[in-house]
Amino acid sequence: MSIPAVKMKLLEGKKGLVVGIANDQSIAWGCARAFRGFGAEVAVTYLNDKAKPHVEPLARELEAPIFMPLDATVPGQMEAVFERIGETWGELDFVVHSIAFAPRDTLAGRVTDAPLAGFLKTMEISCWSFIRMAHLAEPLMKNGGSLFTMTYYGSEKVIENYNIMGVAKAALESAVRYMAAELGPKRIRVHAISPGPLATRAASGIPEFDTLLEKAKRKAPARELVTIDDVGVATAILAHDATRLMTGQVLYIDGGYHIMD
């Protein structure tokens, strides 16, 4: 699927933030490109100075009016981004949170053996950061809006080598449900998007990930792997007002892989 093929201005006039673009293979990039293709304005963040050269050309391609650093572990950076959005736009219609992290030793080890520091770091970046973004986005979503985060099937089934990240994703999905209940009266929808396995830089840290990709392609009813554009287009469509009564969901974009045993 190509983004130019879906350039219907379904989201024209909407403004949103996409967090988590690392390069042109990122799920967040697929989302940002789809939102822009549907006519929305998109603000973009980058992790740090090392990441900036990889993200800046993509931000230019999106014609992003806001391009700022956002490291969830650096005090004040997240708040600065939302403050800038308030100053520039005065409102916000959607947020895409596509960041997760676990220290290598914590991810590689058993959940049973997880050190406290590694567990807390994993939860801070992979779960709490989405909760904090929702808190900061809420006052800007004056006419309602949509909050999206990225999860994975390892939240509900034991996936070999996914380990502590599965625990964090389970907490993230629970947070989605609670926030959907709390923010629903303000017409703010909250979803977790669960793509099938994707060859991204983040996934490269998971041992034997190539084997997981092969298994997904073999077992998924669609017999093909999902792409970042598949994820992006589906996510962007969920930001349309036509889906206003959908909230609190874990939405699988995986060719049906999750229904198979």
Image (spheres, rainbow, N blue to C red):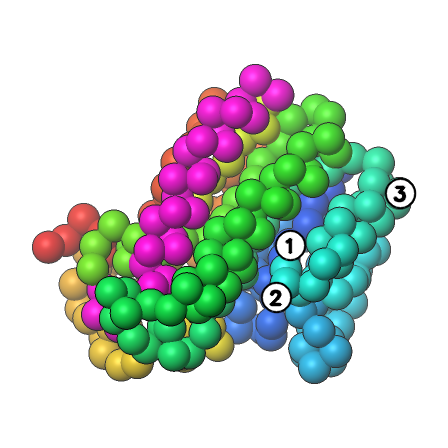
Which amino acid, by three-letter code, is at mark 2? Ile
As measured in the structure, the alpha-carbon distance from the residue carrying label 3 to the one carrying label 1 is 17 Å
As measured in the structure, the alpha-carbon distance from the residue carrying label 2 to the one carrying label 3 is 23 Å
Q: Are marks 1 and 2 in contact (CB under 8 Å)?
A: yes
Name the foreground residue: 257 vs 39: 257
Q: Report the side of 118 relative to 187 (left or right).
A: left
Frontmost of labels 2 and 3 is 3
- The residue that mark 2 highlights is 21
Name the foreground residue: 37 vs 167: 167
For image coordinates 70% across by 63% down, the residue present is: 74
What label sits on residue 87 in the rendered view?
3
Which amino acid, by three-letter code, is at mark 3? Glu
Q: Magenta includes 149?
A: no
For image coordinates 67% across by 32% down, the residue present is: 138
Query: Magenta region, mostly helix, strand or loop?
Result: helix
Report the number of numbered marks. 3
What quarter of the picture does the C terminus occupy? bottom left
> Dot 3, how many residues are within 10 Å of its Cα: few (below 14), some (14-19), or many (20+)?
few
Magenta region:
159-186
Q: Position of residue 204 (x, y in %)?
A: 41, 79
Q: Position of residue 174 (x, y in %)?
A: 38, 40
- The residue that mark 1 highlights is 18
Which amino acid, by three-letter code, is at mark 1? Val
